[in-house]
Structures are given as C-alpha cells and as structure tokens.
Amino acid sequence: MSKLWGGRFTKTTNELVDQLTASISFDKKLANEDIQGSIAHVQMLAEQGIITEDEADQIKEGLLRVKEKYDQGVLIFSEADEDIHMNIEKFLIEEIGSVGGKLHTGRSRNDQVATDMHLYLKNHTETVIELLENVQKAIVSQAEAHVYTMIPGYTHLQRAQPVSFAHHLLAYFWMIERDKERFQDSLKRVDVCPLGAGAMAGTTFPIDRERTAELLGFSSVYPNSMDAVSDRDFILEFLSASSILMMHISRLSEELVIWSSEEFNFIELDDSFCTGSSIMPQKKNPDVPELLRAKTGRVYGDLVGLLTVLKGLPLAYNKDMQEDKEGMFDTVETVEGSLSLLAPLLSTMNVNTDTMKKAVTSDYSNATDLADYLVKKGMAFRDAHAVTGQVVLEAIQKGSVLLELDLADYKEHSELFEADVFEAIAPENVVGRRNSQGGTAFKQVEHQLELAKEKLKK
C-alpha cells in the first residue's frame, strides 16, 4: 500500500529520507495513547453525525484488535509508514478495510501527536509523584530512627556544627517535597487537550472538542489551535522539574558515596545495592548512587536539547518537533528508574551511630557554642570569636579537642570561663540548644517529622 499521504506525489520517497523522517523506532511507545485518542475521536465523530454509529463501532472494534496485537508484541511496525499514527491507521485498515480510512476525519497528525504526548506525560507525571512519595517515606523512616543520632554538619565540606542525623536527612525530604509540588503543578498544563486543533487552523467539520477532552479525561482544551499543535511547554516543564529533581538526587547520592567510604564510615549500603571489583576482592562499590549521580547529566541534556530545538521555530507545527520525543522518553525512564532504586536504597541503609558519635566528639564543631558561651557572659561576639579561635589553636597544638582541655587552659584566655563551659560545649547540648524554628534541636526535629508525616497524608 502506498503512503497514506501520497496522492499528491509522483515519486516514491528516497530511502534516506524515509530513514531521516521516520520516528516509529521510538514513538511506538505512544501506541496505547494513540489508540486511546483515536477511540475517543471516533466516538465524538459518531455523536456529531460526521460518521455513522456503525462505522464508529467498526473502527473502535478494529482499534481494540490492533491494541490487543500490540500488547501481545506481534505487530511489525514499518519505517516506510513513518510514525505511530500512520502505522496504527495502516493496521486498522488491514483489520476492517476502507472504513478505517474515516478515522482521520477532522484531525491531523499534528494535533494527534500532541494529544498522545499529553496523555503519556499525564500518566507518567502521576507515577513520578507516587515514586517521590515512596522516597519521602524511606527518608522519614530513617529519620524517625535517628532523631538523637548526631553527625557533623558541614560547610565547604569542613566540619561546621553538630546536627541531628534526622535533621540532615529531612533536608532532602523538603527538597523532594518541592519537586513533588512542581510535578503536581505541571499537571495543570499537561491536563489540556489539543485534539481538534487539526493541522493548525481547526477543521471544517462540526466536531465537539469539549466532548473529546471529556472522553480522554482532560480538564480543558487549548483555546488557540495554533498554540495547541506547536506547544511543547508542558514537556519542557516536565524536563525542567526532572532536572531539578535529579540535581537533588545527585546531591544525596554524593553524600551516600562519601558517607559509605572507609574514611567516613557513617553508613553502610546494603549488599544488594552495591557491586564488587573484578580484580580487588575487598571492594564494595556504591555503584547505584554513583550512577544516579551520573544520570543527572543525561536529564539535563534532554532539557537543553529540546530548548534548543524549539528556540527558533515559527508557528505552527514544524518537523523539528519530531525531536521532542526521545528526550522525553529518556527522562521519564531515567527518573522513574532512579526513584524506584532510591527508595529501597535508603530504606535498607545501615547507620553506623557509634562512628557518627565519635566524629562529633573528636572535632571542633562545638567552637561556635564556645563563642556563644562568652557572649552570654557579657563579651562582645567579635571578641568572643577571637578568644575562641585562640582556644581552638591551643587545642590543635596540644593534639586535643575542646572537651579535653582543662579549665585552667580556658582561664588563660578569659576569666569568664567557668566549670559550666564543658556542659555548654557537650555535643548533645550543642545540638539540643538550637531550638529555633527549623533548627536541629531534637524537639524541633521531632516537630519537623510530624510536619513531614502530615505532608505525606495529604
């Protein structure tokens, strides 16, 4: 059978042109969405009297048979038929004969492909939101177990102040909460139906776009037919939200890699999420977080790639837009795969509490509290900062930490120091006193956990 659009042409398409323009190798992923959109379209055509009820029934029955064959994996797609839309239509005509040719009445591949992608992203955005919540639950579970576990907090990757390990973990909960909100908000732009916009100017047939949108579960329709077929903002928004999400996953993955090293030994990842070395028998490599960290780059690339494709396009549809799908599919698969691994990775992570405790008692991360101690005794903060720096220097020179110095050592620097200084700089008190809203004090972290649980209930 010749190409469905071949009536105007006198020559067959050059084979290299077929290879360049064909998208069936990747847009076959849209088969179910394409059939779903076609069934709704043909039902609307019948309701509007554009085709008969009998014709609509034949077409719907044929489409369901094509879907069954697709689900069974027995359909053989043809590059000569270019894309998923023309392949499905060819299969339909083979199933039910020439009446299948009436399916495309009142629509174009331009509004058809846009509809397919809206349906596809609507489903997968909802899946991503569910997977994000699974990661949040894993974080909350670990945080609940480690409210009173202390870990050095870092700035510049230098020990800064001790914090609750739960507080550190919950920082990622709130990052992911913002990611989830971005995806939820993006659904408003995904949940709009382009079908009925035609090639770019609408159609002369008395179609009912609101009815088609209703049948497909969309909340509204595009008010402008040119915008409907040329808009890819909804894909860009998904890719953008995904890029920010993957950046957060990468930051967490970096910490998991560092924490699981022998130098830190703060955590141990479960064996089922690690691999070994082909030459070094002792190795246990954190390959999963390393790859999650790396896959961030490909999602960034998908976003920048589509932005570049779209940046110079005039209205309305252009063949350039065929390049919108592979990056979208790649990002969906990357994000869903990453989140599916991250939740169990976190849930099964073992926390080495003794190592963490040793870390916060063998450094100088309580120095800020030493300065605050002097301020509360009446010294100006800038003077207290200088005195504390001198005390820290003395401790370093003696190979000691602040808790190991004698009161006499402190008195040499200021008479304001009293025996209660040791209580003031004990790590559990350093953490416990940071009771400002959102701080790392254990009471604040417990409150934060309740807030996180409330978010998950919603």
Image (cartoon, rainbow, N blue to C red):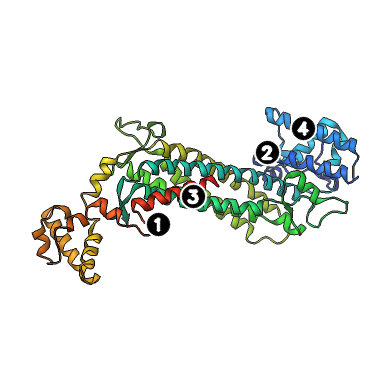
Q: CA gap, disc 4 to disc 3? A: 39 Å
> In the picture provided, is 144 more to the left or to the right than 369?
right
**Three-letter amino acid code at the position of disc 1:** Gly
Say which quadrant the N terminus sits in: top right
Q: CA gap, disc 2 to disc 1? A: 48 Å
> In the picture provided, is 363 more to the left or to the right than 128?
left
N-terminal-most mark, 1 or 4: 4
Which is nearer the eye, 161 or 252? Answer: 161
Question: In front of the other: label 1 or label 3?
Answer: 1
Asked whether residue 179 appears in the rendered view, the answer is yes
Q: CA gap, disc 1 to disc 3? A: 17 Å
Quarter of the figure with residue 262: top left
Residue 438: which disc? 1
Question: In front of the other: label 2 or label 4?
Answer: 4
Residue behind mark 3: 176
Q: Secondary structure at mark 1?
A: loop
N-terminal-most mark, 4 or 3: 4
**Three-letter amino acid code at the position of disc 2:** Lys
Residue behind mark 4: 64
Q: Residues within 10 Å of mark 1 (few under 14, many from 20)?
A: few
Residue 28: which disc? 2
Looking at the image, residue 358 lies above or below residue 420: above
**Three-letter amino acid code at the position of disc 4:** Leu
N-terminal-most mark, 3 or 2: 2
